[in-house]
Amino acid sequence: MLDKNVLNKTEPKNRKLTERKLIDAVGEIIRSTGYTGLGVNAIAKSAGVSKKLIYRYFGTVDALIETYLIERDYWVTFSKKVSDAAVASNKKQTMIEFSSSIFENQFDFFFNEDEMQRIILWEISEKSNILNELSRKREAMGEELLKLTDPYFKDSDINFRAVSAIIICGIYYSVLHTKKNASTLCGLDLNTEAGRKEITKAVRKIVELCFGSKKKKAN
C-alpha cells in the first residue's frame, strides 16, 4: 500500500502532466476532425487517460475546452503587453507603434494558427456557450487596449473603436479566404510573404492616418 505522503507529493506533478495531455488533446481533435469531434470519449482517448480525469481536473468537458480556447486566443493572452503599454500611454508615438504592432502580430498569429482559424469559423457558424464566453473574454481584453487609445480621439471625428473592428474583421476574413481558396485577394497573394507584408504595411498606415488626421466633431 502506497504511503499517503508519497501520493500527495506525486499528485501535483501527475495532475499537471495529465491536464496538459487533455488540453493538447482538444487541439489535436480540432486540427484533425474539427469541433464536432470534441466529445468526452474522444478527448480522453486522444490524451490516453481516463475520462474520469476530465471531470476530476476540469469539472466539465466545456471547462476543459474553454481552457484550451483561452490558451490559444490572441486577444485573451496579451494582457501583459497592454500593461506595459499603459506605462507609456501618454506618448502618442508609443501608442501608434503599440496599436500597429498589436494588429500586425494578430495577423501573423492568425495566419499561422490552424486551430484558431477553425475556432473562428466555429464561432461565426454555430451558437455555443463556450464560444460566447470566449468572445466576452476577448472583448474584455480588447477593451483594455481601447481604453488606452480613447483619450487620443476624444471629441474627434474618428472612431478608433470602429476602425479597430474593421481591421480585426479584415484580418479574420483575409486569412480565412487565403487558407480556403487558391485565388488572390484584391490582387494580393497572401500565401506569399510579400503579399502578407503589404497587408501589415496597410494596417500600420491606417493606424498612423487615424492618429495623424483626426479632426474635431462637427456640431
Image: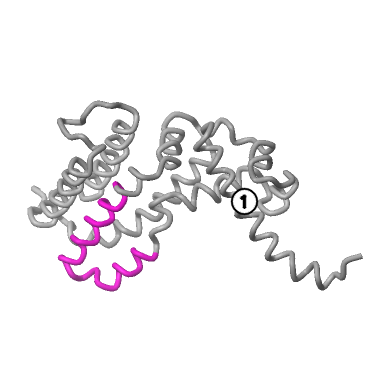
The magenta stretch spans residue 88: yes
What secondary structure is the magenta-colored segment mainly?
helix
Q: Position of residue 197 (x, y in %)?
A: 19, 46
Q: Amino acid at mark 1?
A: Lys
Q: Quadrant location of residue 124?
A: top left
Stretch in magenta: 80-107
The magenta stretch spans residue 114: no
Q: Residue at x 56, y 30 (%)?
A: 36
87 to 33, vertically: above or below: below
According to the picture, the residue beneath numbered tag 1 turns out to be 21
Q: Position of residue 30 (x, y in %)?
A: 52, 37
Q: Position of residue 73 (x, y in %)?
A: 43, 49
- Left or right: where 218 falls relative to 160: left
Q: Residue at x 42, y 42 (%)?
A: 116
- Left or right: where 122 falls relative to 65: left
Q: Position of residue 43 (x, y in %)?
A: 64, 40
The image's colour scheme reads one colour
- Left or right: where 65 falls relative to 78: right
- Left or right: where 32 falls relative to 139: right
